[in-house]
Image (spheres, helix red, strand yellow):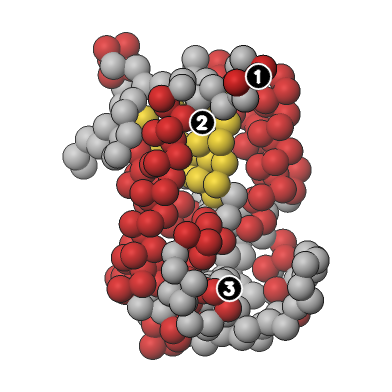
């Protein structure tokens, strides 16, 4: 195995002593069904690979090992789902944040790959921030929504690319780990949900094939563009934060 200095698990005490890093990226995923065509580990692998892309373009930044399990109870009607409970996921994130703070890290970017982790991220990160006022935590909770906002409005063909294993997620998987994707088996259902409100669904209420949206509209070309715009947008945000040492306060209160 070749040593990758972007992956903290490859580093040792001598590395930390001679060249300490100041920022870490925490990738969060899940282990659950992603239709007939994407791997169970889609969310964790996507978050981790995008995190490595981001770290490669930044200074003094490393990527923590991904959390490969998430809060996936709402997907358990489709196998193979291995889920953490809400409180467990929250505690894991909180413990990781507390540990990196103890190690002297004050800047954390959370790269989330799974919708069920969003509420635990909020609780854990707010708790850590309140406990340590100098802790700077930035989170991308839903990359799948962000790319839809920054890409041209006609980029996706169906439902703005949304969906679990849908057009957008399948496309980016084709760009990240094509050898694990089987697009010929792709099927999906576009759900009919009311606007403006957040329906607390279980996934079998939205689809009978383990995927929502339209994965048949996915392509490698779309995935490559999504990967680049996702990485470049986050790198731009974190680079701007670096210019002010992550001091995002308004001028009036500095």
What is the spatial separation of the Cα atoms under label 1 and label 2, in whole angstroms?
Answer: 25 Å
Q: 82 or 216, which is in the foreground?
A: 216
Up-down relation of residue 114 to residue 189 (above or below):
above
Which residue is drawn at the image coordinates 75% and 43% (left, top)?
Answer: 87
Under tag 2, what secondary structure? Answer: strand
Give how far across and how far down residue 221 sits, in percent.
Answer: 30, 73
**Measured from the top left, where is residue 191 in percent x and y?**
68, 82
Quick one: label 2, few (<14), some, or many (20+) residues within 10 Å? many
Nearer to us of marks 1 and 2 is 1
Judge from the rendering whether residue 4 lies leftward or rightward of residue 82; answer left or right. Answer: left
* Residue at mark 3 to residue at mark 1: CA–CA distance: 41 Å
| Residue pointed to by mark 3 | 163
Tell me the quarter of the picture where residue 173 sits: bottom left
Label 3: which secondary element: loop
Q: Are marks 3 and 1 in contact (CB under 8 Å)?
A: no
Q: How many marks?
A: 3
Give the labeled residue for mark 1: 252
Question: Which mark is on residue 170?
Answer: none
């Amino acid at each position: 195995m070749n040593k990758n200095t972007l992956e903290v698990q490859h580093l040792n005490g001598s590395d930390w002593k001679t060249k300490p890093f100041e920022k870490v990226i925490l990738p969060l995923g899940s282990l659950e069904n992603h239709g007939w065509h994407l791997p169970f580990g889609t969310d964790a692998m996507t978050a981790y690979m995008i995190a490595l892309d981001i770290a490669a373009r930044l200074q003094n930044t490393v990527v923590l090992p991904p959390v490969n399990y998430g809060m996936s109870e709402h997907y358990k009607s489709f196998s193979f789902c291995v889920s953490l409970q809400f409180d467990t996921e929250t505690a894991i994130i909180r413990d990781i944040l507390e540990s990196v703070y103890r190690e002297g890290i004050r800047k954390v970017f959370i790269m989330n790959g799974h919708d069920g982790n969003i509420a635990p991220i909020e609780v854990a990160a707010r708790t850590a921030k309140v406990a340590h006022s100098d802790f700077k935590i930035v989170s991308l909770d839903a990359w799948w929504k962000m790319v839809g906002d920054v890409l041209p409005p006609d980029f996706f063909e169906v439902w703005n690319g949304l969906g679990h294993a849908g057009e957008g997620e399948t496309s980016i998987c084709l760009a990240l780990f094509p050898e694990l994707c089987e697009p010929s088996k792709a099927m999906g259902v576009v759900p009919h949900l009311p606007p403006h409100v957040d329906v607390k669904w279980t996934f079998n209420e939205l689809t009978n094939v383990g995927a929502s949206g339209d994965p048949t509209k996915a392509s490698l070309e779309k995935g490559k563009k999504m990967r680049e715009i996702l990485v470049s947008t986050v790198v731009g945000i974190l680079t701007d934060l670096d210019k002010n040492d992550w001091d995002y306060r308004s001028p009036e209160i500095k």
